[in-house]
Amino acid sequence: MTDDETRANTGDAASKDESKRKPVSTAVLLSALGIGFIVLRMFAVSGYDWETAFLVSTTLSLDDGLALVFGSLMSGYLLTAFLLMLVLPMIFAAYLWGQRRHRPVVMLLLVLGLVALFALAFSFGFWWLPVASAGVFGVYALIRILPSPNSVRRGFMAVLANMRWVVGIAVLLLAALVGTPWVPHEVIETKTGTVKGYVLSVDSGFLNVLTDEHEFLIVLSSTVLSRT
């Protein structure tokens, strides 16, 4: 075997190893993002109190993942709108000017972001949000046409090449800053008084409630008169 053939085989083996490592790294990133999101949400809704966060963690199960994510996005709609205004134009820029092999994933993120943007606009009258997002994209377009040696342009293109990190950081910021739990607010009338807060779970014979003051309460179902 010649030296050229040896180098070619070595290169093929290296590229195969690299292609095998990429799905693993993506899976590890998603797992870390999911764990980080859940931990930050528990602390955020607990007022960053360790004991309360521990009690909140006992109410969660594996089936609560989607409810926790979507409930957090909807309860923190103001912060969600602000992050969308910054990140959605960047996702669109990544679709236009980023690497072609990432386009299917970027397209999925873009569609989800647009759905969320217009849902916020229609639901809360945030008509400024599409306009502001278009303005932010205009700023990104101006950065894109800067000369190649420009450090701002180089940094911007590097960010576009790593959009998964941008989206991940945005999601973690949302998890850490939204103090409202992922379930609706309720007023619970009981035989001993009124409890205002969020029912995190309903177990046999009792409710796990996080009050507006970030206090974890266990309310016996037999004492509940109404929930509104």
Image: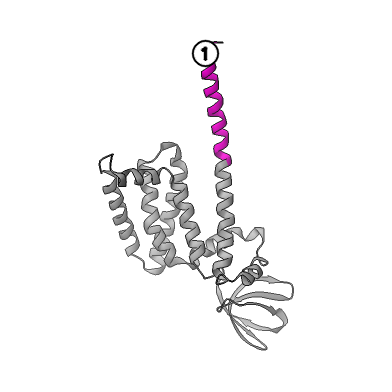
On the rendered structure, is 174 left or right of 85?
A: right
Quadrant including the N terminus = top right
On the rendered structure, is 92 left or right of 200?
A: left
Residue 226 position in % (x across, y down): 63, 82
Q: Is residue 100 above or below residue 58?
A: above
* Residue 52 lies in quadrant: bottom right
What is the residue that sits farthest to the top in this orientation? 1
Mark 1 Cα shell of 10 Å, populated few (<14), some (14-19), many (≥20): few
Residue in the image at 56% along x and 64% along y: 41
Nearer to me, 190 or 24: 24
Residue in the image at 56% along x and 25% along y: 13
Residue in the image at 64% along x and 71% along y: 51
Residue 18 position in % (x across, y down): 54, 32
Q: Is residue 206 above or below residue 71?
A: below
Magenta segment, prevailing SS (helix, strand or loop): helix
What amino acid does circle 1 point to?
Asp
- The residue pinned by badge 1 equals 3
User: Which span of residues is magenta-colored?
Assistant: 1-24
